[in-house]
Image: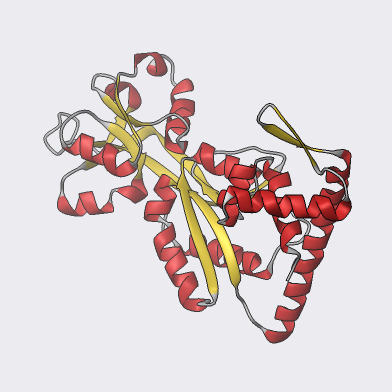
Amino acid sequence: MADRRLQVFHTVARLLSFTKAAEMLHMTQPAVTFQIRQLEEQFNTRLFDRAHNRINLTEAGSRVFEYADRIFELYAEMENGVREITGEISGALTIGASTTIAEYMLPTLLGDFNARYPEVSIHLKVSNSEGIVSMVEGNTIDLGVVESPLVNKNLVVEICRQDQLVAIVPPNHPLAKGKSVAFRDLLDYPFICREEGSGTREVINDYLSGLPGCAAGLKVAMELGSPEAVKGAVEAGMGVSVVSKATIQKELRLATLVTLTLEPPLFRPFSFVHQKQKFRLRVMEELLEFARAYCKSQPD
């Protein structure tokens, strides 16, 4: 319903990239460029300065962007107003989640949400926590769910639930007979960890910084990009690791891994992250409420 040229312009202006805007809008870059040129012809002025492979808004472009923001906010308010009368919950949302959450928490949550609201289309993007926060800041996703502590005054951060991290070792490992372990005792063995930028890696680094001598003594044998890869390496006897308790239920049932509670215990928040829009689509509000209820219903 909103002017397509204005939608394209608004996306390019937010991302300051024709390439990223084309990807987000599922358009070709020439098509995006054509829409911008049409809008510039309508206003008879340039809306972007293009130099050295970078673009910036002109003074006129900044003014159009301000009005476009207000137009789309009013458009969202209009949609919500009508849907409050009709009772309809529909639309499309793009969610971004860090790897652990996308693999072990969201499938059930989104499946239950879809069963209740079949008219809502949800697209999921997976990255590490750093990448998800970047997507939220760039407004390329509507809602992020991350697995590390986050303080960002430009975004709304809402803790969903607390997640416990535990040490994992193979069943034949010397530490496997215990129920808990001090991190300093893990330093005697090769350590399998997630990549830089991962929420799990960040939480472990922060935890180690509070334990004298532990950070310097950590023997990182491998850096891997997913919880499944980390668990596989530990099962193969290549080292020990620390992972979310939520990720190892299958391995515990099959007795391919043994868990040890860390001393002192290690917890981290799972958090919702989104922009501070003054007005959000009703479908976004419904998803947030549904997710809050889901998190409260899950066992610690």
Left or right, residue 60 beside residue 22: right
Display coloring: secondary structure
Please provide percent x and percent y for residue 191.
28, 26
Quadrant of the rendered structure where residue 298 is? bottom left
**Is residue 132 among what the camera can see?**
yes
Task: Say which residue appears at 55% left-offset and 38% top-offset.
Answer: 149
Task: Say which residue appears at 79% left-offset and 54% top-offset.
Answer: 39
Quarter of the figure that contains the N terminus: bottom right
**Is residue 276 among what the camera can see?**
no
Left or right, residue 261 beside residue 49: left
Please provide percent x and percent y for residue 288.
60, 62
Front-most of 31 and 98? 31
Left or right, residue 173 beside residue 125: left
Please provide percent x and percent y for residue 286.
61, 69
Residue at the farthest bottom position: 86
Please provide percent x and percent y for residue 100.
40, 47
Task: Say which residue appears at 49% left-offset and 50% top-offset.
Answer: 97
Task: Say which residue appears at 62% left-offset and 77% top-offset.
Answer: 89
Front-most of 14 and 139? 14
Quarter of the figure that contains the C terminus: bottom left
What number of labels is visible? 0
In the rendered image of this protein, does residue 13 appear above or below residue 142?
Answer: above
Front-most of 255 and 23? 23
Front-most of 158 and 28? 28
Quadrant of the rendered structure where residue 75 is? bottom right
